Image: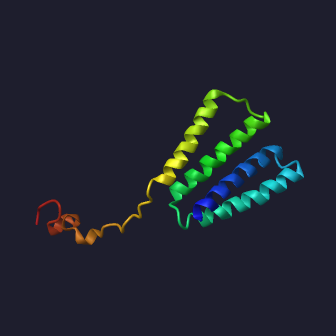
Amino acid sequence: MHWIVLLASAVLEAVWATALGQSEGFRHPEPTIVFLVTAALSMLGLGWAVKRTPIGTAYAVWTGVGAALTVGYAMVTGTEAVSLWKVVFIGGIIAAVIGLKLVPAAVPGPAPDASSDPASGPASEGGASGRG
């Protein structure tokens, strides 16, 4: 479920990014309202998704999918030029997102306790220096 919310939030990111451009510096009310609503919903979804997805992965997916959709929409509507290289690199972003989904999320263990490592003691106590 968290991946569905994360992807929906990425779609909303593309919507708010597009609306931001159309607002022309918040001078047009309709795209400004769309921007404000979808930005808030996108952030809320991202915030919920990171409870179950590592932040680095979630943020990469959120920004990657959002960026790919934003550029794709701009190319389809004619506000941005289409080129083979853009399509190739957008495909790379999507491939990376799929890769992040397929890689198992390892849960990091607790940091080792420095007090249990005899070599980490102060030098005056015969620690790593070997002097006693």
Tell me which residue sits at (57%, 42%) in the image: 93
Q: Nearer the viewer, residue 97 or 117?
A: 97
Q: Position of residue 90 (x, y in %)?
A: 61, 38
Quarter of image, res 35 = bottom right
Which residue is painted at 53% across and 66% down in the image? 52
Residue at the extreme top of the image, as rendered:
84
Horizontal and vertical percent position of residue 105? 45, 59
Between residue 36 and residue 121, name the one nearer to us.
36
Vertically, is 37 above or below 83? below
Instruction: Say how the picture is coloured.
Output: rainbow
Q: How many labels were placed on the picture?
A: 0
Quadrant in the rendering for residue 84: top right
Whole-percent x and y of residue 125? 16, 69
Image quarter (top left, top right, bottom left or bottom right) of the C terminus: bottom left
Quadrant hosting residue 38: bottom right
Determine the residue positioned at 65% across, 53% down.
Answer: 10
Residue in the image at 39% along x and 64% along y: 108
Given residues 129 and 20, the one toward you in this image is 20
Residue 123's x, y, as percent? 18, 64
Residue 52 vertical position relative to residue 72 in the rendered view, above or below = below
Which quarter of the rendering shows the N terminus?
Answer: bottom right
Horizontally, residue 28 falls left or right of residue 73, namely: right
